[in-house]
Image: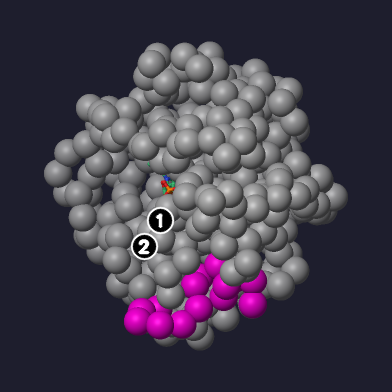
Amino acid sequence: MDIDTSALFAPIVINGHTVKNRISVAPMTRITATEDGRATEMMTRYYERFARGGFGTVITEGIYTDQTFSQGYVGQPGMTDEAQANAWKPTVSGIKAHGALAIAQMMHAGAISQGNRFRDTTVGPSPIQPKGEQMTFYHGKGRYALPSEITEAQIADAINGFAESAKRAIEVAEFDAIEIHGANGYLLDQFLTEYANNRADQWGGPTENRVRLILETLKAVRGKVGAKVPVGVRISQGKVNDHQHKWADGERDAEIIFGSLSEAGADFIHVTEFEAWKPAFAPAGPSLMHLAKRYAPKAAIFANGSLHNVEQAVAALDDGADIVTIGRGALANPDLPRRLSDQGLLNDFDPTILGPLANIKETELVM
Ligand SMILES: Cc1cc2nc3c(=O)[nH]c(=O)nc-3n(C[C@H](O)[C@H](O)[C@H](O)COP(=O)(O)O)c2cc1C
């Protein structure tokens, strides 16, 4: 049976920028930068394929934002100086050459940093051992380090790192838009997460306080890039080191988080769940993308999580999503939008692409 995919190919305007369709590449860390954090020619070829394959938006992997505590992985690219920003230029122009919107994801790894050439120690909201284990496909091994409690001055530095890096991403590398990584267990999400944050100051306690660092980061980024650049935030419940996590106050937390992001002027909110269509708070009830749209009706909602299946992707657009973002399905099908519009078959994702390390493989680049 043919599925009507036309909704996936309708343009949308985000803060004055027209995006040609509703299908985006999800951010994926591939540890293929130089040792000193410069994007490489291989990355240019890798990212350009997605744009050539018809994706309307390409979101980069998480890019580290300062030369102190933000770097998470060996081989991760940064945006912390002119050399790193310049190195992104060919990749950005390759994405834009095919008419896709180029979004830079800005990331601070915080307590789950497992490879940082600037520091041997980590910081987090509180000195609490992170759950889970380091990722071996990103050169990690064993438990995460016990972080130090990040000081007020270090928080100011972290915010400033996001803001200055975002400015470089726009002005030097020439990205179209910025995504702040507030999800998946990294620094900003550590603040949001009750069990990782037992601070007694303005950054800890009730959800309104725990979301504050995300809001302050958003405001600082906005202050540096100006009103006309689309700026969004990625939000999740699950984490790379705790897949099953759920917000303790359920829908009330969703209202506070999405509502405050909307008030703070997020142009888009990118929500991610394992399966985007499932109730956000089991056993029943609305999905997280639905709640994001409900409490942030002015923001474009990007939804992620097992949406490579065309029926699920189309249905997501009826359930609050404005754009669907595809991770593993894009690795398996860099031309996924073309295949969907031609009602073509999709390749299954082959996890061996990401082993033994998650670096980009030459075999991915022949298309
Ligand atoms: C290899 C790999 C690297 C990832 N790196 C990032 C990242 O840098 N930033 C991020 O926000 N999410 C990252 N993710 C999560 C994806 O953006 C996405 O949420 C996940 O793959 C689920 O979407 P999917 O079902 O379409 O694959 C990564 C996922 C994979 C598979």
In the displayed structure, 225 sits above or below 207; it is above
Judge by depth and name the residue closer to the eye, 359 or 265: 359
Label 1 sits on a secondary structure element that is loop
Local packing at callout 2 (Cα closer than 10 Å; few below 14, some 14-19, many 20+) is some
Q: Which residue of the protein is positioned furthest toward the left in this rendering?
A: 142
Label 2 sits on a secondary structure element that is loop
Please name the amino acid that badge 1 sits on. Asn
C-alpha span from label 1 to label 2: 6 Å
Residue 332 got which mark? none
Q: Earlier in the sequence, mark 1 or mark 2?
A: 1
Q: Residue 44 location in percent, x, y?
A: 56, 20
| Magenta region | 281-294
Q: How is the image coloured?
A: one colour
Q: Is residue 235 left or right of residue 112?
A: right
Task: Kindly tell me whether residue 233 is visible in this rendering.
Answer: no
Q: Residue 82 location in percent, x, y?
A: 63, 24
In the displayed structure, 278 sits above or below 169; it is below
Q: Residue 217 location in percent, x, y?
A: 60, 57
Q: CB at mark 1 closer than 8 A to ligand 1?
A: yes
Q: How many marks?
A: 2
Q: Can you tell which quarter of the image residue 238 is in?
A: bottom left
